Image: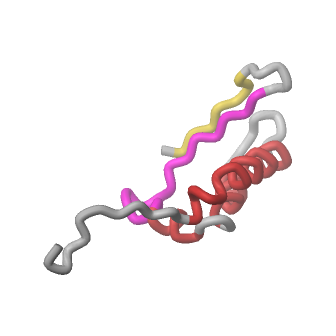
Amino acid sequence: ENGIVQEVNLIVATVNNKAAMNLSIRAAAAALIKGGKYDQGLLNQVEMAFRAYDPCFACSSHSLPGRTPLILRVWDADGNLRVELRRD
Protein backbone atom coordinates (compact mmCIF):
# COMPACT_ATOMS: atom_id res chain seq x y z
CA GLU A 1 0.00 0.00 0.00
CA ASN A 2 1.52 3.34 -1.06
CA GLY A 3 4.74 1.55 -2.02
CA ILE A 4 5.15 -0.11 1.39
CA VAL A 5 5.14 -3.88 1.71
CA GLN A 6 2.41 -4.85 4.14
CA GLU A 7 3.04 -8.60 4.27
CA VAL A 8 5.64 -10.98 2.87
CA ASN A 9 6.46 -14.68 3.03
CA LEU A 10 10.10 -15.32 2.13
CA ILE A 11 11.43 -18.75 1.31
CA VAL A 12 15.16 -18.45 1.87
CA ALA A 13 18.00 -20.92 1.36
CA THR A 14 18.10 -21.88 5.02
CA VAL A 15 14.53 -23.19 4.88
CA ASN A 16 15.17 -25.23 1.75
CA ASN A 17 18.45 -26.69 2.99
CA LYS A 18 17.74 -27.23 6.68
CA ALA A 19 17.79 -31.06 6.62
CA ALA A 20 20.96 -31.26 4.53
CA MET A 21 22.59 -28.54 6.62
CA ASN A 22 21.86 -30.43 9.85
CA LEU A 23 23.30 -33.65 8.39
CA SER A 24 26.46 -31.83 7.28
CA ILE A 25 26.93 -30.25 10.71
CA ARG A 26 26.44 -33.63 12.35
CA ALA A 27 28.98 -35.27 10.04
CA ALA A 28 31.52 -32.48 10.55
CA ALA A 29 31.19 -32.63 14.33
CA ALA A 30 31.45 -36.44 14.39
CA ALA A 31 34.57 -36.37 12.22
CA LEU A 32 36.32 -33.54 14.04
CA ILE A 33 35.54 -33.90 17.76
CA LYS A 34 37.65 -36.57 19.40
CA GLY A 35 37.26 -37.32 23.09
CA GLY A 36 35.24 -34.16 23.70
CA LYS A 37 38.28 -31.98 23.03
CA TYR A 38 37.86 -28.88 20.90
CA ASP A 39 39.31 -25.46 20.27
CA GLN A 40 38.38 -22.34 18.33
CA GLY A 41 39.79 -23.74 15.09
CA LEU A 42 37.70 -26.90 15.38
CA LEU A 43 34.54 -24.88 16.05
CA ASN A 44 35.30 -22.79 12.96
CA GLN A 45 35.52 -25.97 10.89
CA VAL A 46 32.16 -27.20 12.17
CA GLU A 47 30.71 -23.76 11.44
CA MET A 48 31.87 -24.08 7.83
CA ALA A 49 29.41 -26.96 7.40
CA PHE A 50 26.45 -24.56 7.51
CA ARG A 51 28.12 -21.62 5.77
CA ALA A 52 28.24 -23.62 2.53
CA TYR A 53 24.44 -23.73 2.44
CA ASP A 54 23.61 -20.14 3.32
CA PRO A 55 26.54 -17.70 3.38
CA CYS A 56 24.21 -14.79 4.17
CA PHE A 57 23.16 -16.48 7.40
CA ALA A 58 26.77 -16.79 8.48
CA CYS A 59 27.46 -13.09 7.92
CA SER A 60 24.27 -11.99 9.65
CA SER A 61 25.13 -14.05 12.71
CA HIS A 62 28.44 -12.16 12.99
CA SER A 63 26.85 -8.73 12.88
CA LEU A 64 25.75 -8.79 16.54
CA PRO A 65 27.44 -9.18 18.98
CA GLY A 66 30.49 -9.78 16.83
CA ARG A 67 30.92 -13.54 16.80
CA THR A 68 28.78 -16.51 16.01
CA PRO A 69 27.13 -18.10 19.03
CA LEU A 70 27.30 -21.87 18.69
CA ILE A 71 25.98 -24.83 20.66
CA LEU A 72 27.19 -28.22 19.51
CA ARG A 73 25.62 -31.32 21.06
CA VAL A 74 26.94 -34.84 20.49
CA TRP A 75 24.72 -37.86 21.21
CA ASP A 76 25.75 -41.51 21.30
CA ALA A 77 24.00 -44.30 19.39
CA ASP A 78 21.54 -44.77 22.28
CA GLY A 79 20.43 -41.13 22.15
CA ASN A 80 22.30 -40.03 25.28
CA LEU A 81 23.86 -36.58 25.27
CA ARG A 82 27.61 -37.16 25.55
CA VAL A 83 29.10 -33.71 25.00
CA GLU A 84 27.81 -30.16 24.80
CA LEU A 85 30.24 -27.55 23.49
CA ARG A 86 29.28 -23.88 23.75
CA ARG A 87 30.61 -20.67 22.33
CA ASP A 88 28.40 -17.81 23.52
Question: Percent from the top left, x then y, of residue 86?
Answer: 57, 39
Count of picture labels: 0
- Does the magenta-highlighted stretch encompass residue 15? no
Question: Percent from the top left, x then y, of residue 71?
Answer: 58, 41
Residue drawn at point x = 69 percent, y = 49 percent: 19
Q: Is residue 10 above or below residue 36?
A: below
Residue drawn at point x = 76 percent, y = 53 percent: 24
Question: Percent from the top left, x then y, of residue 63?
Answer: 40, 65
| Front position in the image: 68 or 1 | 1
| Front position in the image: 65 or 25 | 25
- Magenta-colored span: 61-75
Decide if residue 59 is on the left or right side of residue 79.
left
Question: Percent from the top left, x then y, of residue 35?
Answer: 82, 34
Q: Is residue 5 above or below residue 61?
A: below
Q: Is residue 1 above or below residue 38?
A: below
Residue drawn at point x = 44 percent, y = 64 percent: 10
Colour pattern: secondary structure
